[in-house]
Image: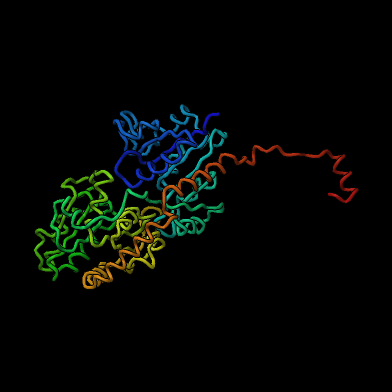
Amino acid sequence: MSKPKILWSADAVATTGFARVTENLCKRLKDKYEIVILGNNYWGDPCELAKDFKIYPSSNRFQTEPFGVQRIREICDRERPDLVFVNNDMWIINQLYDQIKDFHGEGRFKFVAYTPMDSYGWTGCLKDFAENFDEIVVYTEFGAREFHYAGINKPISVIPHGITEGQFFPMDKVEARKKLKIPEEGFIVFNGNRNQARKRIDITIAAFAEFCADKPDTKLYLHMGMKDQGWDVMNLFGREMRKRNVDPNGRIVMTTQSHQPPSVPVEMLNVIYNCADVSLNTCKGEGHGLINHESAACRVAQVVPNHTSLKEIFEGAAPLIDNCFMDVDMNFNRDMPVPAAEHLAEILGDLYDDRQLLDQVAEDCYQRAIDPKYQWDGIAKQFESQFETVLNSVDPLSVPTIKRSKRSRRKAKAKGLA
């Protein structure tokens, strides 16, 4: 008997958090399903993942849109999947679904969306097609609530991201720094998020500059592109440091000197996480926060904003940064709380001054990160259950309607049955 076929649309092979989600789940589900991947940020080069899965690049010479919007219809027609699964932001899921909604309406396949929720009060996007999907799965309970607040009436399932035992783990901090050829002594503040608008790297830089003014043994480590889609971090760092009469030279560490994001294997990423004393996130909205989760699994203290999914995951374990402003984002008028650089600087000062507190926060974050509910083995089983339920569900429109004749209705009425 052939296995059900899933067309899996998401990042693949690339050194991104979304790609790690794809690889961790697909490897655990491949014995149950035939999985064909439509891989974002995959360009067709030979790779280990291609030994187990057929992978289509989302872009090719003729179709350059990065998420497979121009390819998904052709691939659905060619592969004839039983289920289409998309892990992406909701507006991208909508674009993909719009290309194949007639196929779905004809009953060719089931459609499951796995999507982050990173903000509040959406005025568009969420309801465009959601009621037509066979299943919506979000990463956090906060995310499910926001979907319902937006007017989605159907049930929303919650399945988090996770970690794999042995992939991200604590190691000796000095050894990690030796491997990276950075000074073994001193206090390192880390941010490993992408340099783009939502991540508000400028707040990390401003807070560090304020915190470090009288602490010459402190450094900021940024694991990100020097420009990418966000800030010119080197020039911004220099300006913020000089504002406080601090020499910026020798106070910042970058994984790469490239404007684009660094590309390192998981083994090296684990070393990078372990070199830090504190790992920050200063975003204005987060769907899960996989960088912080993975870093916490290395027993590194986390400091995150008091909002969205980060609050749900780390409240009670990590210090939460106060929000100082509500940014109304241009995409769908989303409310996105902006964390306060001044409060973050105070938190960093407290952790620097009290190493016992720092160690306790690191332990609390570690225990939170390795909770069994965040293990990929268990998460994959949850998805298997979801897929089985969806694949075995019957479309109400396909169930024949039973109509009684006028004569039988009259008989039933006479007997008091109708």
Residue 318 lies, in percent from the top left, at 34, 66
Q: In which quadrant will I find the N terminus?
A: top right
Q: Is residue 323 visible?
A: no
Q: Is 222 on the left-hand or right-hand side of 136?
A: left
Between 30 and 349, which is closer to the camera in this rendering?
30
Residue lying farthest to the top in this orientation: 78
Q: Residue at 36% x, 56% y: name it.
A: 286
From this view, report whether residue 171 is shown above or below residue 358: above
Q: How is the image coloured?
A: rainbow
Q: Is residue 290 visible?
A: yes
Residue 74 lies, in percent from the top left, at 44, 29
Q: Quadrant of residue 352?
A: bottom left
Between 358 and 248, which is closer to the camera in this rendering?
358
From this view, report whether residue 385 is shown above or below residue 338: above
From this view, report whether residue 174 is shown above or below residue 414: below
Q: Residue at 17% x, 50% y: name it.
A: 179
